[in-house]
Every structure is written in structure tokens, then in C-alpha cells.
Image (cartoon, helix red, strand yellow):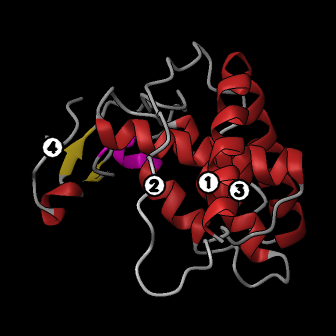
């Protein structure tokens, strides 16, 4: 399954693709389907549709923003795609978010530096491709969606899934924590 080429337009980002029923990211076996997929996440059209369906069911709860964030971060980290700049950045940000929320009690909102006028120039983080683990967790979006009508159970499953995905990336935890600490230090220096 080929991912979208860099430089293609957003309209082509969700190009129609056909899959064989297995998701190249999470490995879930889903009915083969033809439909849109994400531009650079390594997900089958069926898995992408499942994520969209699950994503729309989480915001009605009081803790819906935390659950939605964990859903987004777990899904992206479990579908890293192929080595390219957008994938490197996406995986890094979503893994840092998982670390922040699951290990450091972070809130559902990303902190932004408090600046006045133009933001000062600052050096970007030294992000690089993290070779994905052979197994990106045992749970998938379909596990969270199984609790069709029970929002509490669904939120618990998303939390467990996010923890499972975070644990799968254990060999890179040191690097991810270092990136997160460097990001916080830069943010504090600006604010």
C-alpha cells in the first residue's frame, strides 16, 4: 500500500484506496473495503473509517477531551506510516503526548508558550525516525469501539489502549522523554 507522496494536495491526502482487510499499522483484520485513508498514517481504509467512527463518539463525556486526545495519540502512534518528515513529526508529537498524559498527568490541552508579538527564534527539537516496534500493541481501535453504547466502558478501553500502545514503544521511551523535557525547557525559556 503506497502512502501519499510529499507535496500532494490535501484533497489527494484522503485518496480512495482499496485494502485486503488487514491494517498495515495495527494489524487489525477488518472487512476489506474501498475508501479514504489518511495522508501519511499507515492505516487501511477500513481502519481509518473505524477511527473516524470512534472519534465521533467520545466528546459527549465530561472527560471526553482527555479520552479523545488519548484516542488520537494512540491511533497515530500505532499507525506510524513510512519514514518521511511528516511521519517523523507525527509519531514524535503523539508519543510525547502519550508520555505527558499517561506518565506525567498532563492535561487534555497542549501547552503553548506565552509570547507577546512575534515568537522568538528557537531551535527545533532534534526529532528523528524511531523504528517502530515489531508489535505496536495488542489492542486496536476496534477494541475500544466494541463498547458501542457504554461511554464509560469505551473511555476505559481507550485509556487501556493508549497505555498498551505507549508500552509497545518502550525501547524508545528514553528518547521520547528527552524530547518532551527539551520541549518543556524551550517553552519555559520563551514564557
Which marked residue is nearer to the observer: mark 3 or mark 1? 1
When asked about the image quadrant of residue 178, the answer is top right
Q: Nearer the viewer, mark 3 or mark 4?
A: 4
Residue, disc 1: 186
Q: Where is residue 79 in the image (x, y as percent from the top left)?
A: 48, 37
Distance between the alpha carbons at the discs numbered 4 and 2: 26 Å
Mark 3 touches mark 1? (CB < 8 Å): no
Mark sitting earlier along the chain (3/4): 4
> Which comes before the other along the chain, label 3 or label 2?
3
The stretch in magenta equals 40-47
User: Are the residues tagged 2 and 1 within 8 Å (C-beta)?
Assistant: yes
In the image, taking residue 147 as reference, residue 184 lies left or right, namely left
Q: Distance between the residues labelled 3 and 4?
A: 27 Å
- Residue 148: which disc? none
Q: Label 4: which residue?
A: 6
For the residues labelled 1 and 4, the Cα–Cα distance comes to 29 Å
Q: What residue is drawn where x is 66% and y is 72%?
A: 191
Mark 2 lies on a secondary structure that is loop
- Real-space Cα distance between discs 2 and 1? 8 Å
**Residue 161, image x, y percentages:** 76, 43
Q: x and y percent of residue 16 in the render?
A: 19, 53
Instruction: Please tell me whether mark 3 or mark 2 is closer to you in this view.
Output: 2
**x and y percentages locating residue 126 in the rendered image:** 47, 33
Say the numbered circle drawn on residue 70. 3
Q: Quadrant of residue 35?
A: bottom left
Q: How far apart are marks 3 and 2 (CA)?
A: 28 Å
* Residue 154 to residue 100: above or below: below
Amino acid at each position: 500500500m503506497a502512502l501519499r507522496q510529499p507535496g500532494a494536495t490535501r484533497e489527494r491526502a484522503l485518496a480512495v484506496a482499496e485494502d485486503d482487510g488487514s491494517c498495515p499499522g495495527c494489524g487489525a483484520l477488518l472487512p476489506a473495503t474501498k475508501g479514504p485513508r489518511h495522508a501519511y498514517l499507515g492505516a487501511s481504509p477500513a481502519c481509518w473509517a473505524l477511527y473516524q467512527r470512534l472519534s465521533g463518539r467520545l466528546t459527549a463525556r465530561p472527560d471526553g477531551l482527555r479520552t479523545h486526545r488519548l484516542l488520537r495519540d494512540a491511533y497515530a502512534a500505532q499507525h506510524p506510516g513510512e519514514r518521511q518528515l511528516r511521519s517523523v513529526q507525527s509519531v514524535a508529537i503523539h508519543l510525547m503526548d502519550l508520555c505527558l498524559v499517561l506518565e506525567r498527568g498532563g492535561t487534555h490541552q497542549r501547552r503553548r508558550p506565552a509570547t507577546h508579538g512575534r515568537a522568538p527564534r528557537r531551535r527545533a527539537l532534534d526529532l528523528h525516525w524511531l523504528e517502530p516496534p515489531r508489535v505496536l500493541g495488542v489492542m486496536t481501535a476496534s477494541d475500544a469501539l466494541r463498547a458501542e453504547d457504554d461511554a464509560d466502558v469505551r473511555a476505559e478501553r481507550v485509556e487501556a489502549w493508549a497505555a498498551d500502545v505507549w508500552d509497545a514503544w518502550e525501547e524508545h521511551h528514553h528518547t521520547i522523554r528527552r524530547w518532551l523535557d527539551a520541549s518543556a525547557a524551550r517553552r519555559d525559556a520563551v514564557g
